[in-house]
Amino acid sequence: MNTFEAINTRRAIKKFDSTYKMSPEQVSSLMELTILSPTSYNQQNWRFITVTDQLIKEQISKAARNQSQPSDGSLVIILCGNMNAWKEDPLRYWKNSTLEKQEYVKNALHTKYAENPQNQRDEAMRSCGFAGQTIMLAARQMGLDSCPMVGFEYDELAKIINLPEDHLIVLMIVVGKASEPANPRGGQLSLDKVVFENRF
Ligand SMILES: Cc1cc2nc3c(=O)[nH]c(=O)nc-3n(C[C@H](O)[C@H](O)[C@H](O)COP(=O)(O)O)c2cc1C
């Protein structure tokens, strides 16, 4: 499958085949690809909870207002942002580079995120957004389907995954095999409604 096909065939699946189970190797390959997603200053501020345990998946379904995807899909990935990634040993984000570069990035991160929770939060949203699309497109290449979800009770899900205070849940993605095709597309806006040349 090429990239265009993956983009065209990725759909938000509502019904997953509950008998299909991904292998640990498949989960690991998917996550290895996911962490190649871009982040500002390479700060890698996403944290991923991968859930395959059936009991926990069922708890997640309950927190997701009884939507069936988490319990029936093979893998539930909770994409979280670490609000303090910018200051947690930041030299490691450029460990393959010069010390000079490492120090430069450390200072730049401090300038942008210290005492700026809005920037920390915005960055979590951006990073998890990119990672989410990587997950869904890589899943297609692996012959799998997915559903991005935010229809869940935040506090309930936070409790299930033991969310640290300085992290937030950005979204959840269920991966598995569809047992029914997606609903017909809702209706895309035409390009002229969303694309503007040079300026609004
Ligand atoms: C941030 C986000 C949250 C979503 N939450 C849910 C959800 O809780 N349950 C669900 O069935 N679909 C959910 N969806 C899927 C959207 O309804 C779907 O992506 C949209 O209708 C477009 O359809 P498509 O993804 O098949 O092209 C969500 C999608 C996004 C991007």
Image (cartoon, helix red, strand yellow):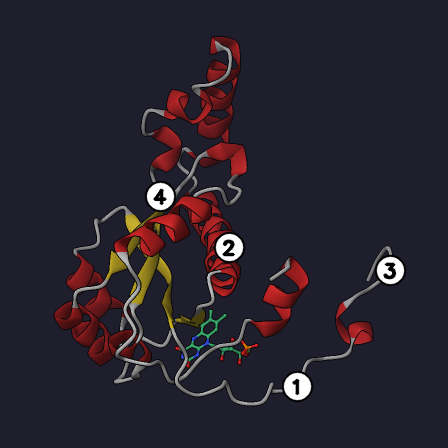
Q: Nearer the viewer, residue 4 or 118?
A: 4
Name the amino acid, label 2.
Thr
Of marks 3 and 1, the one in the foreground: 1
On residue 108, the disc is none
Mark 3 or mark 4: which comes first in sequence? 4
Name the amino acid, label 1.
Gly
Please give the residue where the numbered disc 2 appears in the rendered image: 134
On residue 197, the disc is 3
Mark 4 or mark 2: which comes first in sequence? 4
Question: Which image quadrant is residue 192 in?
Answer: bottom right
Labels 2 and 1 touching (C-beta < 8 A): no
Position of residue 5 in the picture relative to residue 104 (left or right): right
Q: Nearer the viewer, residue 192 or 29?
A: 29
As drawn, 112 above or below 51? above
| Quadrant occupied by the C terminus | bottom right
Labels 3 and 1 touching (C-beta < 8 A): no
Of marks 1 and 4, the one in the foreground: 1
Assess mark 3: CB under 8 A from ligand 1?
no
Q: Residue at x 52, y 89 (%)?
A: 183
Neighbor class of circle 2 (other Cα within 10 Å; few <14, some 14-19, many 20+) is many
Mark 3 or mark 1: which comes first in sequence? 1
Give the image location of residue 21, x and y in percent: 27, 68
Mark 2 or mark 1: which comes first in sequence? 2
Assess mark 1: CB under 8 A from ligand 1?
no
The residues tagged by marks 3 and 1 sit, at their Cα atoms, a distance apart of: 23 Å
The residues tagged by marks 2 and 1 sit, at their Cα atoms, a distance apart of: 23 Å
As drawn, 71 above or below 41? below
Please give the residue where the numbered disc 4 appears in the rendered image: 83
The kind of secondary structure element at disc 4 is loop
Q: Nearer the viewer, residue 94 or 199?
A: 94
The residues tagged by marks 3 and 4 sit, at their Cα atoms, a distance apart of: 35 Å
Please give the residue where the numbered disc 1 appears in the rendered image: 187
